[in-house]
Each structure stands twice: as C-alpha cells, then as structure tokens.
Amino acid sequence: MADRPDHRVRHARSDHPLKDTVTRPRLAVLISGRGSNLGALLAATRRGDLSADICAVISSHADAAGLSLGRNFAIESLTLDYREFKSREAFDAALNQALREKTPDLVVLAGFMRILSAPFVQRWHTRLINIHPSLLPRHAGLKTHQRAIDAGDRVHGATVHLVSERVDAGSILGLASLMVHPEDDPARLASRVLTLEHRLYPAVLKALVEGAFIGREGLILERLLPELPLVRLHE
C-alpha cells in the first residue's frame, strides 16, 4: 500500500538473517493501563533474553501507569488519549502517524484496550501482535476469566496471536495453559494467568527473533505457518 511505513532492508549472509544484521528488531509497545506485560518485555531485553529494542511506548490513556515504565528505561513514551479524538478512525490515523515516525518492525499490543479499525490493521498487517487472556479461539473478547469459570473449563490460559480485522481471530503464535482450581475466582484466576502471560510474551518474541521470522514486511508467514504455534507453556 502507498502508506506502508518504510523499513530498513535486512541483508542476510546466511540462513539466519537477523543474527547477521547490524540492527536489532524494533518493537513499539501499545498500552492502556499498568503495563505489566510491558514490564516483562523490558526485563527480558535488559537480561538479554530478548534481542530486540523497544523503540516506543504509546498509551491510549494519559494516566496509564505503564508510561512510567518506559520512561524509567529511557524509552520515548507518549500518550494518544482516545478521548481527545472525534472518532476511532481519527485516533487510528494519529496512531499510524506516530508509528510511522518510530519505524518499528513489530507493533506489540500489551493490554491495549482499543479495537483497531480495519484500515489500520490492513496497513500494519503481519506487524501487529497481541496477547489475550484465554486459550483462543475459546473466550474471545472480555471477561474471559469469569466466562471460563462459568463454563466449567478445566484448562485456561493465554494466547499470543497476530491481530486481524476480526477481534481475537488472528493466527496463533503461542499458548500458555494452566489447570483451573476449584478455589479459583475471577480475580485469582486472572492473577495466575497474568503470571503466565509474563513468561509467554517474551518467549514468543524471542522465538520470532531467533528463528529469523521477521523481515522488512513484518512476520514471514510462509515460514511461520507450518510451525504454529511457536511456543507452548504450562504453569
């Protein structure tokens, strides 16, 4: 498309292009709240477990606690308060412009509580990744922990997936599961799943980077699809 962001061309000298490039993959992280998954990603990069650079943190809420996490790591952190835009399309246009300026290889949604418009998803397709607190395709949408308990699910968990025009319906990149305990209520189950999310998201991104599945146009789906999901974790 005409407005697709320009990206650096990676020149590979072997069958593992990312390891042969000077630059590391750039990640822009979108948040709306406390940013606990952002914190897990930042910790993974600091430890050296994730060979990528977080180039920007963008929040849809001005009071998001996660903004301070990015600033503490000297990462540019900015707010696009959705309440200041007249429409979802206007918000998405501003978000698109902000991302174009940062030139990320991947856009990582980490507790980003906005439904992105179809034109935005199309513009950034194969670059958008999200984490969802259920084992998709089961319990797409909200209140996943209460729904899992109400349904009598014995197994619950989290999913990392590509973002598509349909909510929570993109290709699954990673899964983390746990057994639902009789004493679990929604709050306790949410806490247990969140602990798994903090392991799963860095593990999936690490697998993408180390497997050389990131190219100048986003994820190389032709190489990904035979191997999905890339990561499976258990509590």
Image: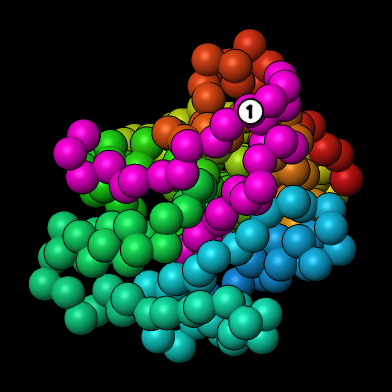
In which quadrant will I find the N terminus? top left
Answer with left or right where residue 153 lies relative to residue 163. Answer: right
Q: In which quarter of the image is residue 2?
A: top left
Colouring? rainbow
User: Is residue 227 visible from the viewing direction of this image?
Assistant: yes
Identify the residue at image location x=34%, y=46%: 6
Answer with left or right where residue 89 lies relative to residue 234. Answer: left
Give the residue type at disc 1: Ala
In which quadrant will I find the C terminus? top right
Residue 133, image x and y in percent? 61, 50
Q: Quadrant of residue 59?
A: bottom left
Q: Give the range drawn in magenta.
A: 1-30
**Tag 1 residue:** 12
Residue 56, image x and y in percent? 50, 68
- Residue 188 or residue 34, whichever sits in front: 34
**Would you place residue 174 above or below residue 34 in this image?**
above
- Residue 32 or residue 128, whichever sits in front: 128
User: Is residue 31 visible from the viewing direction of this image?
Assistant: no
Label 1 SS? loop
- Main SS, magenta region, reads loop
**Would you place residue 211 above or below residue 185 in this image?**
above
Answer with left or right where residue 235 lies relative to residue 106. Answer: right
**Label 1: how many Cα within 10 Å (few below 14, some 14–19, many 20+):** few
**Would you place residue 40 above or below residue 170 in this image?**
below
Whether the magenta-drawn stretch holds residue 34 is answered as no
Identify the residue at image location x=47%, y=53%: 104
- Residue 235 or residue 36, whichever sits in front: 36
Residue 118, image x and y in percent? 23, 41
Identify the residue at image location x=26%, y=62%: 97
